[in-house]
Image: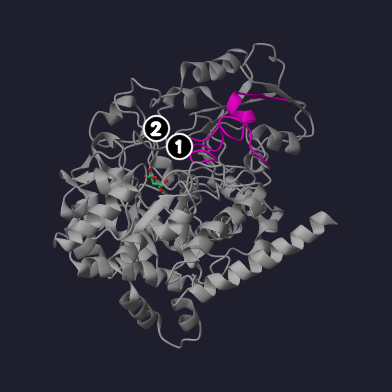
Amino acid sequence: MQKKRSNAFHKITLAILFFSSFVACEFPVKEMNSTQSIEQKVDSLLALMTLEEKIGQMSQVRHFSDITKNSEIASKFIGSVIHTDGPAPGKGAKGWQEKFIALQKQALSTRLGIPLLIGVDAVHGQNTFDGATIFPHNIGMGATHNEQLVEKAAAITALEAQATGFNWVFSPCVAIPYNEKWGRVYEAFSESTELTEKLTKASVKGHQGNLSEPTTVMATAKHFIGDGATDYGKEGGNTTLGPQEISERLLPPYKTAVAQGIGAIMASFNTLSGKAMHAHKALITDTLKKAMQFDGIVVSDWKGYSRFGKTDVVNAGVDMLMTVDGDLDLFQSEMKTAVDSGVVSIERINDAVKRVLRQKFRLGLFTNPFPDVSLIATIGGEEHRKIARQAVSESMVLLKNNTVLPLSNEIPTIVVVGEHANNTGLQSGGWTLRWQGVQENYKGGTTLLKGIQNAAKGTVIYDEKATEKYSNADVAIVVVGETPYAEFFGDIGDGSGTYQLTLSQKHQEYIDTYKKLGVKVVTVLVSGRPLVVTDQIKQSDAFVAAWLPGSEGDGLADVLFGTADFTGKLPHSWPKSVEDFSGKYGPNFWDTSIKPLYPLGYGLTLKHKKND
Ligand code: BGC
């Protein structure tokens, strides 16, 4: 009884607080009855703002470390909150929503009641939430060449992101990777500009819809520009491409994204011929904003303010600063001084703030700032997983088939080899739950092994470390590949670090073992990029490039057993040797002096049963 009373009391208190938070705001009350256009609303709101409020709108923080108390959202007039490297926010999706609702209420309690943009690195599904549907990383989506599928995957990602409390995602990455040594190759769709344009359009459409629906989010094209074209594939390194190549090969996906109404574009860590992209006024302001007429938000990348020239970054045209790891107070105080002293003009600040407000109006946040609780039931739901499974099977690229595929589901004994076969973390890559990915199973996923077990009627043995015990198996499915990585951690550099252009010795031995035992070998490569596997392809009876498929392992079985045919085509040209990488770029069609093992667009179907 006591408990009930206190609950009722709590509810009434909350209702009063909620109501008074609106009464305290001068702006939303007016705005909600207004018939003004978005541009008029932006102008009238801007006219009411103090410099502190404007600088606040340009500030983006992590909710758990850049601010120590929720009330700082209000006292520092924060414009946006981000979440990355999950999990943490709360108990179940409801707990996540509540976490962000509490922050949103802080923003709404301010004098002008300007709502927060709440962003997340949902780059292949809502990958920061344990139990979400995880799609293949973009390299796999590139292999599908299927824009309808990319659009559906983006719409599901948007929905699951909204269901966990977000209205903004930092996706899609529209880089054009020039070198497989780059640790972020898998975040991009393809080395082909045309394919990237096509899939960018679909991705923006899927994420954003018409922007204001409760199931859609604002998308971000990243990283502007030249992130994937740095010399020797170094994350955040220097890009030496000239203006013509930038315009012909790197800009088109951004033009497509802008034409599709993308809400945000993120500046890149790299320099362009020595100049930091964050401070590149000619490209950010003159090209992107003026010539290409992008009217959304240019957001900085991690700690972009203090890393790339402080006021130069703002003057170059960056509108919102990811003020993490100690940048928040620095940015807010220095920006005030910079405006007072004329180093940054108030016109520049006004332009930045107008862009932020414009997107908040377009998203409908002033009238509908909170996530919809009814969406929670859709997270990781059957319909979503079905689409992800289709994406997995369409992303598989068959590089070789020496009569072994399709496998009959009547085969008496199949042995499945390798730790990657039995671990959803390993099959999903970086940006899965944690920034650097995980190496264990997460909620709701199906391993590749389980998918094979679901499809096969005979015995399926799991031989994790390729012992020599199963010489009587009819076929071995050997799953090898890379362990998860993200960003610079995945750079290959000179090959002396963790990641290599070739398979690890251990994984080469898995294939050797079964080859020597005389068992037919179907090799499945789980990797974020094409690797040099010329010898392993020769040894194998069939070879499948599986990329980083995500949560739906059944999708591999669908093509191995011929329930669906292979339709995936290479989104990158495939290297034949480590020497192919001795120059600045890899063996793609940017460097015609290097002949790849397989060209861009290569991929067999089950009709191919060659004897090579
Ligand atoms: C990455 C971005 C990402 C951001 C926020 C940065 O390190 O480069 O792609 O969106 O972190 O997590």
Question: Front-most of 107 and 585?
Answer: 107
Question: Front-most of 156 and 117?
Answer: 117
The residue under label 2 is 490
* Quarter of the view holding residue 520: top right
Residue 416 colored in magenta in the image: yes
For residue 528, which numbered disc appears in the image?
A: 1
Q: What element carries label 2?
A: helix
* Mark 1 CB within 8 Å of ligand 1: no
Residue under the image location 19 percent in, 64 percent down: 286
Separation (CA) of disc 1 from disc 2: 9 Å
Q: Label 1 amino acid?
A: Gly
Q: Is mark 1 on a helix, strand or loop?
A: loop
Other-residue count near label 1 (Cα within 10 Å), few / some / many at <14 / 14–19 / ≥20: many
Mark 1 or mark 2, whichever is nearer to me: 2
Q: In this view, does 264 lie to the left or right of 234?
A: right
Q: Magenta segment, which residues?
A: 414-443
State the predominant SS element of the stretch in magenta. Answer: loop
Q: Are marks 1 and 2 in contact (CB under 8 Å)?
A: yes
For residue 174, which numbered disc appears in the image?
A: none
* Quarter of the view holding residue 591: top left
Residue under the image location 48 percent in, 37 percent down: 430
Residue under the image location 68 percent in, 14 percent down: 471
